[in-house]
Amino acid sequence: AKKNSFERHNYYLPYMEQETQRRLHIVRMLRADFADRRLQVWYQPQICLTTQRIIGVESLLRWPQRDGSYISPGEFIPLAEYSGLIVDIGAWVIEEACQQIRQFDELGLPELRVAVNVSVPQFRMRDFPELVEQQLQNHNVSPDRLELEITESIVMEDPDLVADILYRLKRQGIHVAIDDFGVGFSSLSYLQKLPLDRIKIDKTFVHNSNEDSGRIIIETIVNMAHRLGLSVLAEGVELEEQVSYFKNLEVAEAQGFHFAKPMPAAKLAELLAKQSAN
Ligand code: C2E
Ligand code: CA
Ligand code: CA
Ligand code: CA
């Protein structure tokens, strides 16, 4: 394994050592809790802005602690990536998503798309597309019900590899969205070259949509996406005025606390049952 700079130099400061110890501790706990099946997948609704109905959900990992609190994925996902644990955890999240789709179908709930976040190490694994295909088949789930969310960092790492993998996923009918769009400062040429379905506008832009500077960026992204034939979803929508703003821009979908926070599968099932009763 490649040594990181901490291991190469023996003169690091004590506080750095403390921080390293803390991280190693978290990785050990995460590995143990994952093995004990203590991790959970929660789901956050994605809303069609025309019909106001739930048309998809995003899967979001939750790591419950003994005291009832949760360690935020923003904290443990980078460590899971660094340690390689994300490969197994990520495969499990995809499997959970497939199982969930199957279960909702059996309950006669509306057909949702389920989005899953994919990290760089997962994506770089050999045969990632076949692994996903296998899981879809095992649970008898149609590929067009699954959406993978990848970030610009994945695309920039190795554009040729990414193109190859995306075409293999696409051939199966799996959807692909670019997550956190706009924060990567990356080249935009890949948008034209890759078989993508959707762009998710990062919430930092959405939260600036009350300012001219924020609007300029959002409207440029939306215009470009639409002209390239890509669907757009606004992330982190918290306010009614943001909803009407994005509706006016003909943005198809939104996700955020204004509509619903991430919730356990059982709660989502209740919500969906209520929606289909209306
Ligand atoms: P993300 O993929 O950008 O996910 C959206 C994050 O925004 C979620 O944070 C969600 O709870 C939060 N969010 C949703 N609506 C709002 C809103 O209206 N306002 C605000 N302020 N926040 C909102 P969460 O669940 O803490 O996840 C953080 C990040 O952890 C995710 O960001 C994603 O990068 C990563 N993550 C979570 N689950 C997974 C997973 O299964 N695999 C991988 N690779 N990464 C994951
Ligand atoms: Ca995401
Ligand atoms: Ca995001
Ligand atoms: Ca993010």
Image (cartoon, rainbow, N blue to C red):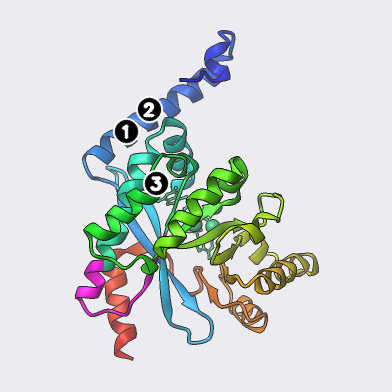
Q: What residue lies at 51% left-to-right and 49% top-to-bottom?
A: 164
Left or right of residue 84, residue 199 in this image: right
CB atoms of marks 2 and 3 within 8 Å:
no
Answer whether residue 231 is visible to the viewer in this image.
Answer: yes
Confirm whether the magenta stretch covers residue 114.
yes
Q: Is residue 147 among what the camera can see?
A: no
Could you tell me which secondary element the residue under label 2 belongs to? helix
Instruction: Residue at 71%, 73% (x, y): give it.
Output: 223
Task: Say which residue label 1 marks.
Answer: 29
Could you classify mark 2 by the number of other residues whose Cα lies within 10 Å: few (under 14), some (14-19), or many (20 or more)?
few
**Residue indicated by mark 2:** 25
Position in image of residue 219 (x %, y %): 73, 71
Mark 1–mark 2 contact, CB under 8 Å? yes
Which stretch is magenta?
A: 102-115
- Amino acid under disc 2: His
Q: Distance between the residues labelled 1 and 2?
A: 6 Å
Name the residue tied to disc 3. Answer: 128
Number of the front mark, 2 or 3: 3
Label 3: how many Cα within 10 Å (few below 14, some 14–19, many 20+): some
Q: Which residue lies furthest to the top in this view?
A: 10
- Mark 1 / mark 3, whichever is N-terminal: 1
Residue at screen point 49% across, 68% down = 257
Disc 1 to disc 3: CB gap under 8 Å: no
Q: What element carries label 3?
A: helix
